[in-house]
Image: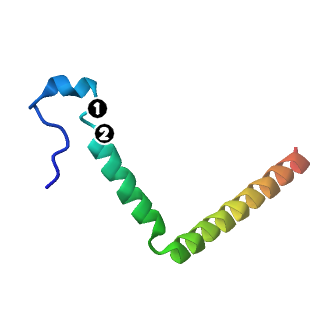
Amino acid sequence: MIEVATTDNLAGGKIISPQFPLLLMSDFIYAYYLSVDTGHKELLHSYTLDILEKTRNQKDDYVKEEGQEG
């Protein structure tokens, strides 16, 4: 278990924030998460961009059709 913030020596909190260790650990965990299974994440990102592009094209086509009817 990692102590994140303690009530002991709170006056020392002026030197370094008691939340700093938590921020540091969350940064390490996030960096690890980014490095794990990058191929799958890149594939998911590409798929998401493709879906968004298709949706945008469908919306543009719908707007054009509505403009021609009016």
Q: Amino acid at mark 2?
A: Phe
67 displayed left or right of 20: right
Tell me where residue 20 appears, x and y as whole percent.
30, 39
Dots 2 and 1: beta carbons under 8 Å? yes
In the drawing, what numbered circle is on residue 3?
none
Q: In the depicted view, which residue is nearer to us: 51 or 10?
A: 10
Q: CA distance from mark 2 to mark 1?
A: 7 Å
21 displayed left or right of 41: left
**Can you identify the residue that label 2 sits on?**
20
Q: What residue is drawn where x is 87% and y is 46%?
A: 67
In the drawing, what numbered circle is on residue 16?
1
**Label 1 crowding class (10 Å Cα cut-off): few <14, some 14-19, many 20+?**
few
Q: Amino acid at mark 1?
A: Ile
As drawn, which residue projects farthest toward the right?
A: 68
Q: Quadrant of the N terminus?
A: bottom left
Q: In the depicted view, which residue is nearer to us: 39 or 67?
A: 39
Res 39 quadrant in image = bottom right
Q: In the depicted view, which residue is nearer to us: 17 or 68?
A: 17
As displayed, is residue 41 above or below residue 60? below
As displayed, is residue 18 above or below residue 4? above
Which element is circle 2 on?
Answer: helix
Tell me where residue 6 appears, x and y as whole percent.
13, 36
